[in-house]
Amino acid sequence: MAWLCLLVSASSVDLVDETYRIPGGEWRYVEVSLRQRPATIYAVLGSPESPPGIRAALLTHEDLYRLNRDRPYGVLATSSPGPVARLSFYVRNPGEYALVLDNRESDKPATVHLRVWLDFAGPPGHQPETLSPQRRMTVILVSFLGFFAIVTWSARRLLQSIRR
């Protein structure tokens, strides 16, 4: 049953799909908790009516604390300012992150739509590994041999039971 769940599970998970109002000269944040395995965080922020200075930035939880205290902080990824901002970053280490919606470059309030999702398919450009054609053929042949061995054994046992 666990194998079936793994096969059915999606490689992408939506986290946020909401509209936010950010006053001019201020910022807001959305928590992104990554507790599973490494993933790529994608975010699309904006609307045609939003001021051109709005941007998104991905920070660690510690850097968010520093930003809140007006101390120097680091940024994992940032979008370019504009009416529509796009951001993507491959996170290797699970943990607590924050997506900051920054409107500090404008004195006008911004109403923006934010969509955030995680993609567990691997780093961008990653190709899943496949077996060589020789190994694939070996796996197929061994599987067939095993299957026919079990069928033959079962048929013999069934025939012996019927004859008794």
Image (cartoon, rainbow, N blue to C red):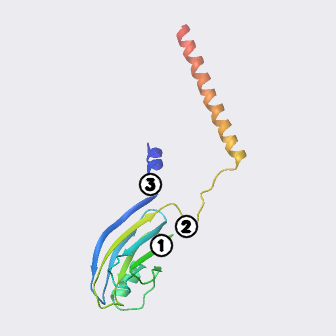
Judge the density around disc 1: few (<14), some (14-19), many (≥20) Cα neighbours within 10 Å.
Answer: many
Q: Amino acid at mark 2?
A: Pro
Label pair 2/1, CB-CB below 8 angstroms: yes
Query: Where in the figure is residue 59, as x and y percent of width and height?
Result: 42, 79
Q: How many marks?
A: 3
Q: Amino acid at mark 3?
A: Ala
Question: Is 153 or 89 nearer to us in this picture?
Answer: 89
Residue on which disc 1 sits? 88
Task: Single out the residue that lies furthest toward the right.
Answer: 134
Query: Where in the figure is residue 57, as x and y percent of width and height?
Result: 42, 80
**What's the mark number on residue 124?**
2
Q: Is residue 91 above or below residue 160?
A: below
Q: Is residue 141 above or below residue 11?
A: above
Q: Alpha-carbon distance for marks 3 and 1?
A: 19 Å
Q: Quadrant of residue 134?
A: top right
Kindly state the secondary structure of the residue where label 3 is placed. loop
Residue on which disc 3 sits? 10
Q: Is residue 46 left or right of residue 158?
A: left
Among numbered discs 2 and 1, the one appearing first in the sequence = 1
Kindly state the secondary structure of the residue where label 2 is placed. loop
Kindly state the secondary structure of the residue where label 1 is placed. strand
Q: Alpha-carbon distance for marks 2 and 3?
A: 17 Å
Judge the density around disc 2: few (<14), some (14-19), many (≥20) Cα neighbours within 10 Å.
Answer: few
Q: Quadrant of residue 158?
A: top right
